[in-house]
Amino acid sequence: MLASPVFDFSKSRVVVIGASRGGIGASIARSFADSGADVMITGVEAAPAPEDSDRFAYQQLDVTDNTAVEAFAASFPTLDVLVNCAAITQRGAEMEPDFFETVLDINLTGSFRTARAFHPGLSAANGTLINVASMYAFFGSPRNPAYGASKAGVAQLTKSLAIAWAPDGIRVNAIAPGFIVTEQSARARSDPAFVAGIEARTPLGRWGNPDDIAGAALFLASDAARFITGTCLPVDGGYSVV
Ligand SMILES: NC(=O)c1ccc[n+]([C@@H]2O[C@H](COP(=O)([O-])OP(=O)(O)OC[C@H]3O[C@@H](n4cnc5c(N)ncnc54)[C@H](O)[C@@H]3O)[C@@H](O)[C@H]2O)c1
């Protein structure tokens, strides 16, 4: 979470999809809660990370299940902020077409499913949608082709929904995190050469942690960002400018 609350979300309802594993989604959820928001989190697991189990209302939700996504969203007649964090990747397994399709279904179509299902609630609140992309929206990844394609798709989807939903008063943006220490990156981080390569290329000289991302989410959801829509904001320690 942020060192001290900067924004006031005390009148806001926030849903963070994919916040069950103590990673980026969980950090974003905690930061909104620390800024006064009423926050609900979801994940594909039966329960959230132990440190969050008392803190947040939790919904087990598979973003590939359209019926379940629509039923969940229907319980929010108004919603101020939707954050789409659900995603998977598996280094080395993504050249296999069935798994490629699975990654796209969760990361890209899943983000669209939740966005579409929450559109009425976001529209009723003049709310905002924040998607989570990746450096691999911009760069190729020989071992994660499905993940990269899905995240490039998320960045593009963000632009299209920003245009489509502007008349409804909904702003749509994305964050592209750099390389962040979470469960999702654990496998990649078991390769010392990969870890060192990221550190060497990142001007700020380190991997990020989930709390490094949360501030951008608060900013993009806040009135300070009221004229920002359709953007994909890198939060990467400078990785993408080298
Ligand atoms: N860790 C990184 O270095 C990094 C870098 C760039 C972008 N990201 C992105 O940030 C977001 C959060 O990643 P993280 O590192 O915190 O990962 P994480 O593994 O901690 O969290 C992933 C979340 O996705 C959920 N999920 C997975 N499959 C799902 C499904 N079928 N239906 C619903 N939810 C499902 C999980 O339950 C979990 O809550 C992801 O979109 C990820 O791609 C991560």
Image (spheres, rainbow, N blue to C red):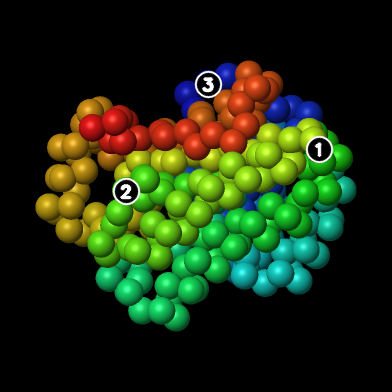
The residue lying at 50 percent from left, 37 percent from top is 232
Nearer-the-camera pick, 179 or 56? 179
Q: Is residue 120 left or right of residue 113?
A: right
Marks 2 and 1, how far apart at CA:
33 Å
Helix, strand or loop at disc 3?
loop
Give x and y (percent) for residue 202.
23, 34
The disc, 3 or 1, on the residue closer to the chain's N-terminal end is 3
**Neighbour tally class for label 2: few under 14, some 14-19, many 20 plus, Cα within 10 Å:** few
Give x and y (percent) for residue 106.
54, 65
The residue lying at 78 percent from left, 42 percent from top is 122
Q: Which mark is in front, 2 or 3?
A: 2
Nearer-the-camera pick, 145 or 62? 145
> 152 above or below 175?
below
Q: Which mark is residue 168?
A: 1
Nearer-the-camera pick, 79 or 107? 107
Three-letter residue code for mark 3: Ser
The residue lying at 16 percent from left, 45 percent from top is 197
The disc, 2 or 1, on the residue closer to the chain's N-terminal end is 2
Q: Which mark is residue 4?
A: 3
Task: Place residue 98 in its image quadrant.
Answer: bottom left
Three-letter residue code for mark 2: Phe
Disc 3 vs disc 1: Cβ atoms closer than 8 Å?
no
* Image label count: 3
Is the residue marked 3 within 8 Å of ligand 1, measured from its CB?
no
Is the residue marked 1 within 8 Å of ligand 1, measured from its CB?
no
